């Protein structure tokens, strides 16, 4: 397994450089196709990247933006990553981008799965994927010990899976490892000593024990303290 590791002097420099890098990759994708698709994580870590990326000059009306995974909660919930995406990325110049949703108003993700997957399947392979990683070495909502871990890691996995994991208060929906790993460009964003140690700890482990390893080959890891 081979990946590129880039260390930055601080988080601000990382955010700016990564935003410019993603913008360049989206431009390249748009030069080769009518549209491009960017998949990004939720949570607070990518926020500064979004703040820089949303201001970039790009044909945003030809760009699809989606989450790599989402909590199965409505957008008005404080737990909604879609809400964060609208506030931090789908604003300024990037307000013209098209959002591919990962939530529909059903009680469970299983009920909305087919409807949501159709819009995403048409965009594969993804142009650019930005991922995070937890201290437990999970990525997207592909958690060790999750109920559908084996299905999410399978080479013939569907593009989207419902996911329930110990300690996660609500069901999730996630892109499969195959959909994530098949992206034309892959970036992984991590901060701090704990995450760097987790990345080192993932070496040599099977993806079921360290799900990040399912998408790490050929990726660029961006790290700052």
Image: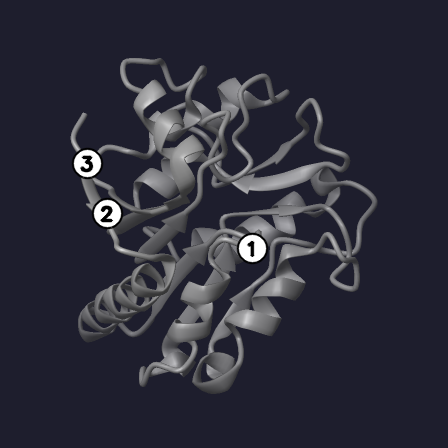
- Please tell me how crowded label 3 is: few (under 14), some (14-19), or many (20+) other residues with Cα within 10 Å: some
Front-lying residue, 62 or 219? 219
Lower sequence index among marks 1 and 3:
3
Image check: 24 left or right of 88? left
> In the image, is residue 213 above or below residue 48?
above
Q: Which residue corresponds to the image point at 55% horizontal and 71% vertical from the top-left?
A: 88
Question: Marks 3 and 2, how far apart in space?
Answer: 13 Å
Gap in angstroms between the C-alphas marked 2 and 1:
19 Å
Count of numbered circles on the image = 3
| Residue 43, above or below 153 | below
Quickly name the residue at label 1: 44
Instruction: Name the residue tied to disc 2.
Output: 7
* Residues tagged 3 and 2 counted as in contact (Cβ below 8 A): no
For label 1, the SS is loop
Structural crowding at the residue carrying mark 2, measured as other residues with C-alpha within 10 Å and reported as few (<14), some (14–19) or many (≥20): few
Q: Nearer the viewer, residue 47 or 10?
A: 10
Q: Are marks 1 and 3 in contact (CB under 8 Å)?
A: no
| Badge number at residue 62 | none
Image coordinates for residue 123, horizontal then vertical, percent: 39, 58
155 over 117 or under it: above or below = above
Residue 201 position within the rendered picture, expressed as x and y whole percent measured from the top left: 35, 19
Q: Quadrant of residue 104?
A: bottom right
- Disc 1/disc 3 C-alpha distance (Å): 24 Å
The quadrant holding residue 111 is: top right
Instruction: Tell me the SS state at disc 2.
Output: strand
Q: Is 54 situated left or right of 74 in this image? A: left
Residue 164 visible, this angle: yes
Mark 2 or mark 1: which is in front? 2
What residue lies at 28% left-to-right and 71% top-to-bottom?
23
Residue at the spot of label 3 = 3
Residue 175 at what x, y percent from top left? 49, 42
């Amino acid at each position: 397994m081979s990946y590129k590791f880039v260390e930055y002097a601080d988080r601000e420099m990382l955010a700016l450089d990564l935003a410019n890098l993603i913008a360049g990759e989206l431009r390249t994708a748009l030069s080769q196709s009518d549209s491009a698709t960017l998949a990004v994580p939720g949570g607070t870590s990518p926020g500064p990247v979004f703040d820089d990326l949303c201001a970039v000059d790009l044909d945003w009306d030809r760009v699809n933006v989606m989450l790599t995974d989402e909590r199965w909660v409505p957008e008005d919930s404080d737990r909604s990553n879609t809400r964060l995406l609208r506030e931090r990325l789908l604003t300024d110049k990037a307000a013209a981008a098209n959002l591919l949703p990962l939530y529909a108003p059903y009680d469970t993700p299983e009920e909305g799965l087919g409807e949501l997957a159709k819009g995403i399947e048409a965009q594969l392979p993804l142009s650019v994927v930005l991922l995070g990683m937890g201290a437990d070495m999970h990525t997207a909502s592909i958690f060790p010990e999750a109920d559908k871990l084996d299905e999410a890691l399978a080479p013939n996995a569907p593009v989207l899976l419902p996911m329930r994991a110990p300690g996660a208060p609500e069901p999730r929906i996630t892109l499969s490892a195959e959909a994530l790993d098949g992206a034309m460009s892959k970036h992984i964003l991590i901060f701090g000593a704990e995450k760097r140690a987790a990345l080192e700890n993932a070496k040599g482990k099977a993806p079921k024990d360290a799900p990040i390893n399912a998408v790490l080959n050929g990726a660029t890891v961006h790290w700052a303290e």
